Amino acid sequence: MAISSAHALDFERPLLELEKKIGDLRSISKSGAVDMTQEIGRLEKKAKKLQEEIFNDLSRWQVVQLSRHNARPYFLDYVNFLFTDYCELAGDRLFGEDPSIIGGFARFDGEPVMVMGHQKGRSTKENMLRNFGMPRPEGYRKSRRLFELAARFNRPIFTFVDTPGAYPGIGAEERGQAEAIAVNLEVMAGLPVPVISTVVGEGGSGGALAIGVGNRVLMMQYSIYSVISPEGCASILFRDATRADKAAEALKLVAADLKELGVVDEIVPEPAGGGHRDPAAAAQALGQALRKHLRELKKLKPDQLIAQRYDKFRAMGVFSGK
């Protein structure tokens, strides 16, 4: 898939220019004016090599940029690719509806499941509606309601994490943001059904963890997962948010780092150049991983699922003398 110039990142632009040239040559060749087949083949090989060079040597800050790419697949995109009969359930039954985190019942390979995730927008209007994927307390209380509903009907749960973090506004704090997140952690820890969480874009702080306490935690190849954003970290440590690239290196927030640290169980490979270049292929790879882990977890009894999840998170953060 060609990269849109409107969404291209700086390090993608050389590849974008080459792909545009290939597209122009194809148009000339199709018109019958000149046969450009040989030149197109040469440039396609050059583009493939350039793509490998760029994406095999990405810095952590470049991965952060990819995780935020505007054309990257969002929660509802994965729902459309992987699930059927999706029925959204709204409201927290306490305050209101929060469109930045959504979910409901669906079918995965014909099996009834519960799915939920953070949802960002691509246009300004969508982002205003979705609050840029930053939930308020009512969003987390809605997800808690859905967790408990899934447990009641014995439905496996799939969560999709993609948020800069929980919304830090005054209203959110007044309505108990911290309490809503804390209760979610407690509820998820005790769910008697399989829970598989996948970081598909940004995994920011407690806002991500509030729906991320799973028996299995997966990460898409170009996603990030951290206690704070690189900009926030740079503002605190260096008093300069423009040094986010340096903070990103220190935070070790990319999938390979977190797999090495034991925070995530599997890295799901993305298509060459990132999931935004081929969303269908990204979803297909994720679907295969979800099937594998669900098959394994369904062999465990409810008390075993709870114990496994508890032990998994208790084991994180162990320091060694090395």
Image: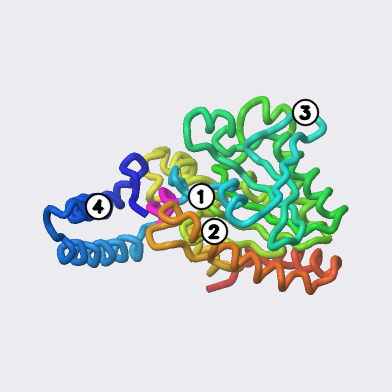
Kindly identify the amino acid type of the residue bearing the numbered disc 3.
Phe
Q: Which mark is residue 23?
A: 4
For the residues bearing labels 4 and 3, Cβ distance under 8 angstroms = no
Q: Position of residue 30 (x, y in %)?
A: 21, 54
Q: Position of residue 54 (x, y in %)?
A: 30, 60
Q: Extreme left residue here?
A: 34
* Mark 4 or mark 3, earlier in chain: 4
Q: Which mark is residue 283?
A: 2
| Secondary-structure class at tag 2 | helix
For the residues bearing labels 2 and 4, Cβ distance under 8 angstroms = no
Residue 16 belongs to the span the image colors magenta: no
Q: Position of residue 124 (x, y in %)?
A: 48, 29
Q: Is residue 100 left or right of residue 16?
A: right
| Secondary-structure class at tag 1 | loop
| Secondary-structure class at tag 4 | helix
For the residues bearing labels 1 and 4, Cβ distance under 8 angstroms = no
Q: Quadrant of the N terminus?
A: bottom left
Above-or-below relation of 248 to 48: above
Q: Position of residue 280 (x, y in %)?
A: 50, 57
Residue sitting at x 58%, y 54%: 81
Q: Write down the region rendered in magenta.
A: 60-66
Looking at the image, is mark 1 or mark 3 nearer the viewer?
1
* Mark 1 or mark 3, earlier in chain: 1
Looking at the image, is mark 1 or mark 4 nearer the viewer?
4
Nearest the camera: 127 or 206? 127
Residue sitting at x 67%, y 53%: 84
Q: Extreme front residue here?
A: 32
